[in-house]
Image (cartoon, rainbow, N blue to C red):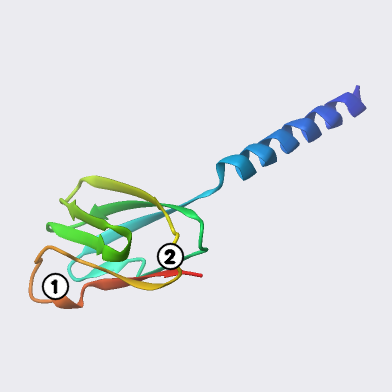
Amino acid sequence: MRFALIFAIFLISCQWNAEQAQNGDVKEFRITARQFSFTPGEIEVKKGDTVRLIITSADVPHGFAIPEYGINEVLMPGEIVSVEFIADKEGTFTAYCSIYCGTGHSEMESRFIVN
């Protein structure tokens, strides 16, 4: 009985690992925009990773743009925006606010790093 239980757990574990490998992991990050920063200020992933960004604005309307990945989203306070893409370009990219949000707007940036 004990052997059967251990073997069943082993088979379930193998199936789960195979599904993960087949579907690929999704790297999910929650980003908050507020005058005049993004938190976190840096995100690092591996080339080929599927990335999901869950982005919100804590105060005023903001934008979130990474032009190299075709991302340019409008963030309204209290609303959630989800963006999913494959990190297929290596390098360090600047994510920035694409909607004027006040005097510190031009400094509102974060880094997206793909190794």
Examine the rendered structure and indicate whether residue 81 appears above or below residue 60.
above
- Amino acid type, mark 2: Lys
Expressed as whole percent of the image width and height from the top left, the position of residue 75 reads 18, 53
Q: Position of residue 40 (x, y in %)?
A: 36, 66
Which residue of the protein is positioned furthest toward the top in this rendering?
1
Question: Under tag 2, what secondary structure?
Answer: loop
Badge 1 marks a residue whose secondary structure is helix
Picture residue at 33% right of the left edge, 60% below the top: 69
Residue drawn at x 26%, y 72% is 109
Q: Amino acid at mark 1?
A: His
Q: Nearer the viewer, residue 102 or 11?
A: 11
Say above or below: 94 vs 12.
Answer: below
Residue in the image at 85% along x and 30% along y? 7
Q: Which residue is mark 2?
A: 89
Q: Are marks 1 and 2 in contact (CB under 8 Å)?
A: no
Q: Is residue 1 left or right of residue 40?
A: right
Using residue 26 as the reference point, say whether residue 7 is left or right of it. Answer: right
Q: Which mark is residue 105?
A: 1
* Image-quadrant location for residue 98: bottom left
* Residue in the foreground of this view, choosing between 59 and 105: 105
Horizontal and vertical percent position of residue 15? 70, 34
